[in-house]
Image (cartoon, coloured by chain):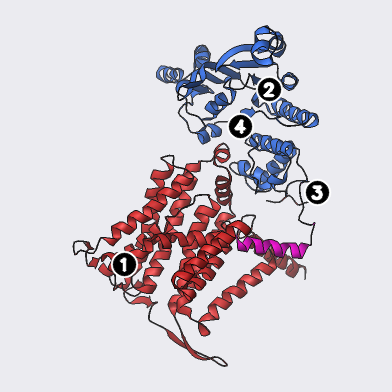
Chain colours: A blue, B red
């Protein structure tokens, strides 16, 4: 690599990544997968996220918690490109993706499950799963990947059932299976267990852990239920009033009196 | 023996593979019975001129192409367009202008291509600014509706002699008469489709004349229907349906939703342009009433009544509704159309043809065999 090329590439990297630019020049890869740099999103006069620096490492499973209105879903929508950032930058695999359209970000390896299950109700489970898979697989490979994705979603036997007829929990699982079928490097889940019973929550937790450990997919999971968070993640980021309030291991976060005050409703 | 068996197996496999391209969850009719019925229906249309008014039916079939154009744009991709008649009219006028200026077989053939391209290009221009400009949902409907009004107003004031393109005067409300008869081919190797009937004599029926134009339109309608069946059951068709169901979700699967809508809108415009070309060729005349609000509403009524998610529904409803409309004529026809639309929306929101198909399937399977989330069929074949 010439000096000019190295310089040009380093210029496009985010702050944390820039620290390891020397490593990049010598061929060492950074482990930072996603990095946001001073990310701001304003809706009129309301600031939903304010100067958010947030990073996710390759293969990491990170949970994002915070009270309602903290800016969690906004942050995810900024990462996917569904919202345009008012200010700041987003770096993915060392490249600035701030100005990319959502589908271009997906093609780089970012996938998302929406807060409200967004499956195609009029299409069968199989047709739902074919949609992400058909982009990169054909014939026998497509059949295999579709069957695997349905198995990941725990819906084997439901292939020909219209997705709209599935229960809320099954739709949540289907959407995770569809999002994972894209074989992403980073999967964003917005409240994947909202409205589910204990057994369904455990099933989802098991699927997330399995995808993370077996396929190395990094996760950012928004969730309010701290028991669920503790069951899947070690590292947690707390958002409050659109800003990163705390980051650290779940045990520390749970026992932090300030977090309890703003999020858990405990005594300060 | 074994060779025969193997050949038979290979033929069946080929036939089965061929048929599978026309079938899928996005169209009605996957059984052998459906295809037998389809062939019978096409055969019935083919012999209809021996018994009825083929000229009138040819008009309905031309309009069915317009219905199909809205079906793929609205029914399959979720873009409710009141502007299909804009592309229909532009196709018709383009055909008229080019064919009047180049009234040779080659010129008229080029005029057909120009008319189809005119519909497609005008849809592409409007679609580009709408979809890449971020216009969505009901706003697309409003813009396309306004487009028809703009075209109607504009074409209505083109009566002056200054509004002529070469030999072709646009004619304002009086329209553009003297469009040359449809002749395809080149000088010395061409065929005239209009006003060129050939006599037939069938024992038991008697003598009658059949119009080549009728069979040209029938061929184009059947070909377009089958072609669109392949499209909507393909991978791209699956994406079209996904865009209709949930744009944001589909974008997050990595699809360029804007481009999908743009491409389908352009294709719909070209199909409407083809319909317009045939309309102008059949009438050897075109006027601005094709841009009127009533005419703009008709495709929406056909597709709603037939079933917007059904290509077959669009064709059947266009033929049936236009037959009723023309038979009744006058104000009563409009009242009937409005009533039909209301009843469909209230009682059969998915349309008549899908409802009829559902009844037939239930009758064949019997109650309780439709399956459901609580009763999955674990042995269901995983095919693709």
Q: Which residues lie in the magenta part?
A: B350-379
Q: What label does residue A112 carry, if any?
A: 4
Element class at badge 4: strand
Mark nearer the N terminus (3 vs 1): 1
Are circles 2 and 4 on residues that touch, CB within 8 Å? no
Alpha carbon separation for disc pair 3 and 2: 33 Å
Element class at badge 3: loop
Alpha carbon separation for disc pair 2 and 1: 66 Å
Q: What label does residue B96 carry, if any?
A: 1
Q: What label does residue B375 carry, if any?
A: 3
Co-location on one chain, circles 2 and 1 = no
- Number of residues whose C-alpha sits closer than 10 Å to that of mark 2, classed few (under 14), some (14–19) or many (20 or more): some
Alpha carbon separation for disc pair 3 and 4: 30 Å
Task: For mark 3, name the chain.
Answer: B
Q: Is residue B372 magenta?
A: yes
Residue A205, x across and y down, in percent: 74, 27
Alpha carbon separation for disc pair 3 and 1: 59 Å
Q: What label does residue A224 carry, if any?
A: 2
Which residue: 72% across, 38% down? A168
Q: Quadrant of the C terminus of chain A?
A: top right
């Amino acid at each position: 690599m010439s000096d000019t090329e190295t310089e040009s590439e380093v210029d496009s990297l985010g702050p944390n990544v820039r620290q390891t630019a020397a490593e990049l020049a010598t061929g060492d890869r950074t482990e930072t997968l996603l990095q946001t740099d001073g990310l701001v999103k304003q809706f009129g006069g309301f600031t939903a996220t304010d100067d958010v620096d947030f990073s996710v490492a390759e293969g990491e499973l990170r949970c994002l918690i915070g009270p309602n209105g903290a800016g969690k879903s906004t942050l995810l929508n900024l990462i996917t490109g569904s919202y345009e950032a008012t200010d700041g930058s987003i770096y993915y695999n060392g490249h600035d993706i701030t100005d990319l359209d959502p589908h271009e970000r997906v093609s780089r390896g970012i996938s998302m499950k929406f807060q409200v299950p967004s499956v195609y109700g009029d299409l069968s489970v199989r047709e739902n799963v074919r949609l992400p898979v058909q982009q990169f697989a054909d014939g026998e490979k497509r059949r295999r990947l579709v069957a695997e994705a349905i198995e990941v979603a725990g819906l084997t036997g439901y292939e020909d059932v219209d997705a709209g007829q599935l229960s809320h929990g099954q739709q949540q699982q289907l959407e995770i299976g569809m999002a994972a079928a894209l074989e992403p490097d980073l999967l964003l889940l917005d409240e994947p267990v909202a409205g589910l019973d204990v057994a369904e929550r455990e099933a989802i937790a098991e699927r997330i852990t399995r995808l993370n450990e077996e396929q190395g997919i990094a996760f950012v999971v928004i969730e309010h239920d701290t028991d669920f968070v503790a069951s899947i993640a070690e590292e947690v980021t707390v958002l409050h009033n659109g800003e990163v309030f705390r980051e650290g291991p779940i045990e520390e976060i749970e026992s932090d009196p300030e977090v309890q005050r703003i999020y858990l409703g405990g005594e300060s | 023996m074994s060779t025969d068996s193997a050949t038979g197996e290979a033929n069946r496999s080929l036939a089965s593979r061929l048929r599978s391209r026309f079938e899928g969850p996005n169209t009605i009719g996957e059984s052998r019975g459906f295809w037998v019925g389809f062939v019978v229906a096409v055969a019935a249309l083919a012999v209809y001129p021996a018994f009825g008014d083929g000229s009138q039916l040819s008009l309905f079939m031309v309009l069915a192409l317009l219905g199909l154009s809205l079906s793929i744009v609205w029914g399959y991709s979720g873009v409710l367009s009141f502007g299909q008649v804009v592309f229909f009219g532009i196709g018709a006028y383009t055909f008229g202008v080019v064919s009047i200026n180049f009234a040779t077989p080659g010129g008229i053939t080029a005029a057909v291509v120009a008319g189809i391209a005119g519909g497609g290009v005008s849809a592409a221009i409007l679609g580009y600014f709408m979809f890449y400009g971020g216009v969505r949902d009901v706003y697309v409907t409003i813009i396309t509706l306004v487009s028809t009004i703009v075209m109607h107003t504009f074409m209505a004031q083109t009566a002056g002699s200054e509004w002529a393109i070469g030999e072709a005067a646009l004619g304002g409300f009086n329209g553009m008469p003297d469009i040359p008869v449809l002749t395809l081919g080149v000088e010395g190797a061409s065929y005239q489709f209009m006003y060129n009937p050939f006599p037939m004599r069938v024992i038991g029926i008697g003598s009658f004349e059949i119009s080549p134009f009728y069979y040209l339109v029938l061929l184009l309608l059947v070909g377009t229907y089958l072609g669109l069946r392949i499209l909507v059951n393909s991978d791209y068709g699956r994406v079209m349906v996904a865009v209709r169901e949930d744009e944001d979700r589909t974008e997050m699967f990595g699809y360029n939703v804007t481009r999908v809508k743009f491409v389908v809108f352009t294709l719909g415009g070209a199909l409407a342009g083809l319909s317009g070309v045939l309309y102008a060729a059949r009438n050897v005349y075109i006027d601005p009433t094709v841009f009127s609000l009533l005419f703009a509403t008709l495709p929406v009524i056909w597709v709603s009544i037939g079933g917007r998610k059904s290509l077959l529904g669009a064709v059947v409803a266009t033929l049936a509704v236009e037959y009723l409309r023309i038979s009744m004529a006058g104000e009563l026809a409009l009242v009937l159309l409005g009533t039909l639309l209301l009843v469909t929306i209230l009682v059969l929101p998915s349309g008549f043809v899908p409802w009829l198909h559902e009844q037939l399937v239930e009758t064949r399977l019997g109650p309780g065999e439709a399956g459901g989330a609580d009763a999955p069929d674990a042995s269901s074949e995983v095919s693709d």
